Amino acid sequence: MSALASSQLAALNRLVAAIARTNRFYQRKLTAADGLHGFESLAAFSARMPFTTKDELARDQLEHPPHGSTLTFPLETYTRYHQTSGTSGRPILWLDTTESWQWVLDNWKTVWRHAGAQPGDAAFFAFSFGPFLGFWAAFDSAQQCGLRTLPAGGMSSSERLRFLLARRPRLLCCTPTYALRLADVAEQEGMPLADSGVERILVAGEPGGCVPEIRARIEQGWPGARVVDHHGMTEIGPVSYGGPVDATRLRLMHDRYFVEVLRPGTNDPVAPGENGELVLTTLGRDACPLLRYRTGDLVRAEQLPGEAPGAFALAGGILGRVDDMVIVRGVNLYPAAMDAAIRAHGGVREYQVEIDQRPTLPEVRVRFEAFDEAGFASADLARHLRATFQMRIDVEKVANGVLPVFELKARRWKILK
């Protein structure tokens, strides 16, 4: 057994001992897996422990309202309340004790460190603060890292830009979509970003930060800044981190999570270099743990040269959602690939993809707004998409302002059934 696997197994069995007697949700699962007293190996854990799914958590909270049966400790010991964004169904409520919240913040400190953040730097948070965990974890951990935190909730994009330009923070936190949106608004309103002071743009919430075409568009709009990707989930916590140099992969916090990449819908690991679903087990966060959680994220594992066996990264970051990938005329399509193709072509301000699965042969249509409404030819984009995906994709140019714009996770993917 490798040193990494040995430390992960020890952390897993410590977690099991902490939750087995009082966490009703996992008491049932651990009993079924003959794991109430721990596991003899990680392979045994993967073979016997049932999965946890988002639908299962939502159902548990309906059956045991309002918080479900996943809490390890008495409710009065919990001090933090968050909930998922609800983009893939009913929002899930998630509570933390002071100790489990600190575990989350310690993970986020890893993201800041690898982004090159230094005590005394200013960090600008370009989003409205709601119950979504990512906002607060980034903000609280930044303060513990000695950063000067600038909250920009309750502002329009124009107001946020003026606020940012007046204070010249070194670090900016937002989604990839909103980084592009802010650059677009800055250009429209004559606010030059070349002297914004921003050197690092930490993005998450959707694929894009590891995609060269999208990263290049963001860095073009923010001269002098480098994009740093990372990802996490409210119910899991911060999972991975990127860096300004090694920008096309996400490194995983293997000391904090046991990570599996499986063929969707099965318990079978995929071969290195193949796409699979990310399955995560928290090795801490005892107050609200998750064991073998099917995240729904589509990823590609890549063994890191010179690293310990099992210490793999995610090549290309988060590729998309397992349930968003569709097969059209034998071609696998998922949002990140379409986003990369459209951004590579250039000239598109905003877009929306419709996949109509009702005909015998599914059809794909892209509706888009152009920066140059008069000079942008739809036929050029159609030819580019056909060459990229080896299939015909209908395109339709619409007037600027017709399509929705997004501050958080973009929802550009519509499947008609």
Image (cartoon, grey):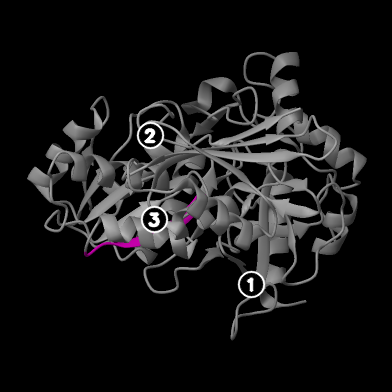
Q: Residues within 10 Å of mark 3 (few under 14, many from 20)?
A: many
Mark nearer the N terminus (1 vs 2): 1
- Residue at point 69% right, 78% down? 309
Give the extent of the magenta segment. 224-231
Q: Is residue 208 magenta?
A: no
Query: Looking at the image, which residue is at 37% across and 45% down?
Result: 138
Residue occupying image coordinates x 41% and y 67%: 243
**Percent position (x, y) of residue 201?**
32, 55
Q: Amino acid at mark 2?
A: Glu
Up/down of 344 relative to 379, above or below = below
Pick out the residue farthest to the left: 166
| Amino acid of disc 3 | Lys
Res 178 quadrant in image: top left
Callout 2: few (<14), some (14-19), or many (20+) C-alpha neighbours within 10 Å? some
Badge 1 crowding class, 10 Å Cα cut-off, few under 14, some 14 to 19, many 20 or more, is: many
Residue 264 picture location, percent across and down: 81, 50
- Quarter of the image that includes the N terminus: bottom right
Work out how far the residue at label 1 is from the one at label 2, CA to CA, in angstroms.
34 Å
Under mark 1, the amino acid is Ala
Dominant secondary structure (helix, strand or loop) of the stretch shown in magenta: strand
Residue 403 at x, y percent in the picture: 44, 29
Q: What secondary structure is marked by label 1?
A: loop
Check contact, mark 1 vs mark 2: CB within 8 A: no
The picture quadrant where one finds residue 181 is: top left
**CA distance separating discs 3 and 2:** 24 Å
Horizontal side of residue 103 vs 355, given as left or right: left
Quadrant of the rendered image containing residue 242: bottom left
Query: Which residue carries the number 2 mark?
Result: 407
Q: Which mark is residue 311?
A: 1
Residue that carries the numbered disc 3 in the rendered image: 109
